[in-house]
Amino acid sequence: VLSGCAGRHNWLASAGEEAHRVEELFWVLLVGAAIIWTGVIGAAVYAQRRQIDPSLEKQARRFIVWGGAVLPTVLVGGLLIWGLVILRDITSDEGDLTIRVDGERWWWRVIYETPEGDVVTANEIRLPVGQTALFRLTADDVIHSFWVPALGGKMDMIPGRETQLALTPRKTGNWGGLCAEFCGGAHALMRFDAIVMEEADFEAWLAHEAEPAEVAESDPGYTVFDEEGCGACHTIRGTEAEGPVGPDLTHLAAREKLGAGIYEMTPDNMARWITDTHEMKPDIDMPPYPDLSGARLDQLVAFLMSLD
Ligand code: CUA
């Protein structure tokens, strides 16, 4: 119980419709079970200590029938129906917007479906408050699980198969998301920010996200990026970098975090990420570039931090 009680991953402080329904169910079950447990244990203790007066045998039998059979059947049946209603309410295959999320080792490929086409980003999911986002989930290689505790339940991401999850945030804020299925070395570092915004802010963000990056051909940092072959894995829309392997970097610096939700997006962290990659996040596919230093590293970092 205590493990879920603090910070932005606290599902008992729900910030979304679906999480709220589950939270409601949890409290009713917990308090109800506590009352029934107290009653049952109380009756057992009472029966241990007292001889039942033989003349009360009939009442005792009635108590057993009503308390031991009828009441539990009605209660459990009622809870079953209520639970099924909640399950129906929080499961949906429709949404006001659709977002495809692909679980990779160990990051998230995020694709917003818009009438003008797909908008690709990574490791940060922004949502408009009060609207239902339908997530279409899949995985690249192993099973992951997509979970934003404050907004709703988790859903497995399975290679070769699509699962769906609807989330309807009720409060703005940054609600952390994480992978909830052990998927290998950096599983615990597979996180993301789920940022809930006012609708107008969200629309502006999405429109900007759809734009290509503004990169000057003469940018010395872009030259380093190009020479080091970063574009073989990463895409920066608007440049020749079209690698499909790693996260899309088009608006990298507009994200709050680096490395799939684990470091603040600062120039220092960016420099360390490039040179000490496996210190920052063990086991990932991106190779470290320990030979990059001095002016070249500074230029590359400045270039990446300009991608906002
Ligand atoms: Cu992905 Cu654990």
Image: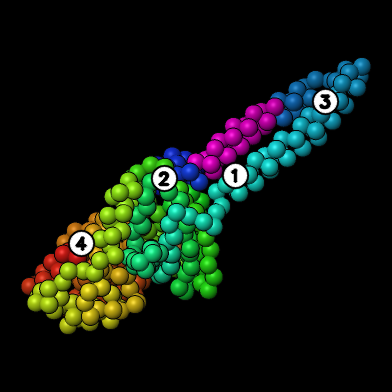
How far is the residue under mark 3 from the one under mark 2?
A: 49 Å
Q: Which residues are magenta?
A: 20-39
Element at label 2: loop
Residue for badge 1: 86
* Residue that carries the numbered disc 4 in the rendered image: 308
Q: Nearer the viewer, mark 3 or mark 1?
A: 1
- At 16% across and 64% down in the image, what residue appears? 306
Q: Nearer the viewer, mark 3 or mark 4?
A: 4
Which residue is identified by label 3?
Answer: 63
User: Does the closest atom of ligand 1 sit within 8 Å of the Cβ of label 1?
Assistant: no
When the figure is inspected, residue 23 is found, relative to residue 138, above or below; the finding is: above
Q: Amino acid at mark 1?
A: Ile
Q: Earlier in the sequence, mark 3 or mark 2?
A: 3
Give me the C-alpha separation between circle 3 and circle 1. Answer: 33 Å
In the shown orientation, is residue 54 left or right of residue 184?
Answer: right
Q: Which mark is residue 130?
A: 2
Q: Earlier in the sequence, mark 3 or mark 4?
A: 3
Is residue 37 found inside the magenta-colored segment of the image?
Answer: yes
Q: Are discs 1 and 2 less than 8 Å apart at CB? A: no
Task: Specify few, some or many for label 2: CA neighbours under 10 Å numbering under 14, 14-19, or 20 or more.
Answer: some
Q: Nearer the viewer, residue 124 or 295?
A: 124
- Give the prevailing secondary structure in the magenta stretch: helix
User: How busy is the neighbourhood of tag 3: few (under 14 within 10 Å), some, or many (20 plus)?
Assistant: few
Q: Quadrant of residue 301?
A: bottom left
Instruction: Give the CA separation, mark 2 to mark 4.
Output: 26 Å
Whether residue 32 is visible: yes
* Residue depth check, mark 2 versus mark 4: number of the one nearer the observer: 2
Element type where label 3 sits in the image: helix
